[in-house]
Image (cartoon, rainbow, N blue to C red):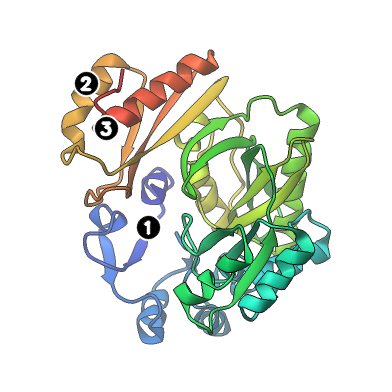
Amino acid sequence: MMHAASIGLGIKVRLLAEAPDSSAAQVVHDVTVGDYTDPVTVRSFAAACDVVTFDHEHVPTGLLRDLESAGVAVRPGPAALVHAQDKAIMRDRLTALGAPCPVSRVVPDAAALAAFAEEQGWPIVAKTSRGGYDGKGVWRLDSAAQASVPFERLGENAQIIAEEFVDFTRELSALVVRSPSGQAAAYPISESVQRGGICVETTTPAPGLDNEQAANAQQLALMIAHELGVVGMLAVELMQRADGSVVVNELAMRPHNTGHWTIDGAHTSQFENHLRAVLDLPLGDPSSNQTWTVMANVFGGSVDDLPSALLHCFARDRRLRVQLYGKQIRPGRKVGHVTTLGDDLEQTRKRARHAAAYLMGDPNAE
C-alpha cells in the first residue's frame, strides 16, 4: 500500500523483504530478500537508499544507530522508534511528559507482579515489554494464582510490565504525521473495535466524540510526536473511560491498520503522507472526504480464493472499496480490508460488515 502511494509521486521504492512471497514483494520490483536483523544485509541494503523507513518496528535499535552513524537517513530514527519497540521505555517517557497512562511497573517475577496487583487491585494487565503484537504477549490476570503465567510463557528472563486494568468503554486511534522540518498534521480520531487484541473495524470520525475531546486527543498525539522526534506516521492508540478521559495504550511509528480507512476516506492517505514526511515534502490534507468511513478487516476463513468472492461483493455494493494483501490464507490471519463511505452511519457500517463477512465465508452474511 505504501508502494502504491509512491507511484504517483515518482518515488522509487526498494524493499528489504523477509520472504519472496511477502505482500510488498509481490508488487515492488526492486526487492532484496534477507534478514532485517542481520547487520551486513541491512547495511548493504541501506547503502543504495536515500531514506530508510519501516512497515514494522522490529529492526534492532543498535543496527539503526549504526546506519545513522554511517550517514543514512533513518526515519523515524532509533531514538524515536525505541518507544514503539519497548513498552517500558515508552511508559517511562510518556509519564515524564505528562501524557495520561495507566499506572505501570516493570516486575522481575511473579511475586512482584502479584504485589503490584495487591496495590492496584485485581484484575491487572501484564505485557511483555518487547515483541508483543495483535494481542500476543498480553495477559489479563484476575488473581495471584495467575501471576506466574507471563513468566511461564516467555521465560524467567522476559521483561514484564504490570499495568492497572483500565475499565474503558471504547478504544480510539489518533493518527498524526510529522516531517523532519517539524510540519505536522492530524487525522480525524477513529473509533476502533478490537477482538482478541486484534483490530476488526474502525469508524471515522469516532461517533459521539465531541469537538473538544477530538481536539484534545489530536493535540496529545501531536505533542507525543514532537517530543519523541517522530518522523512519519504515528498512531497513538487510546482507551477512553466512561467519563470521556483517555489514556495511552500503545504507540506505532508507521502506517497503521487503524489508518487504512485513509486510502479511500481521506484527501491524503496515511501512506502518501508517510512518504511525504520521510522525504520532507509538504504534507497533504488529512481531513475526511466523506461524512462517515468504516473500515472492516478481512481475516482468513473458509474462502481460499478471495478474488472469486468479489463478484457478489461488487454486485451488491458498487461503491465498496477492497484491499486484498496477497497473503496465504490462514484462519485468523489478517488478509485484507474493505472500506465503505456514506452519510448514514448504520448503513455504512452494515455495508462494510457484510462485505468483510462474505469474504471470510460467513454463511450468515446478509
> Residue type at mark 1?
Lys
Rendered location of residue 310, percent (x, y): 22, 27
**Which residue has dot 1 on it?**
12
Badge 3 crowding class, 10 Å Cα cut-off, few under 14, some 14 to 19, many 20 or more, is many
* Secondary element at tag 3: helix
Image marks 2 and 1: residues in contact by CB distance under 8 Å = no
* Secondary element at tag 2: helix
> Residue type at mark 2?
His
Q: Measure the C-alpha gap from mark 3 to mark 2.
A: 9 Å
- In this rendering, position of residue 140 left or right of residue 52: right
Instruction: Say which of marks 3 and 1 sits in front.
Output: 3
Q: Is residue 279 visible?
A: no
Rendered location of residue 267, percent (x, y): 54, 32
> Residue type at mark 3?
Leu
The residue located at (53%, 61%) in the rendering is 138
Q: In the image, which disc is placed on residue 312?
A: 2
Q: Measure the C-alpha gap from mark 2 to mark 1.
A: 36 Å
Between discs 2 and 1, the one toward the N terminus: 1
Image marks 3 and 2: residues in contact by CB distance under 8 Å = no
Quadrant in the rendering for residue 214:
top right
**Which residue has dot 3 on it?**
359
Q: Quadrant of the C terminus?
A: top left
Q: Is residue 124 above or below residue 259?
A: below
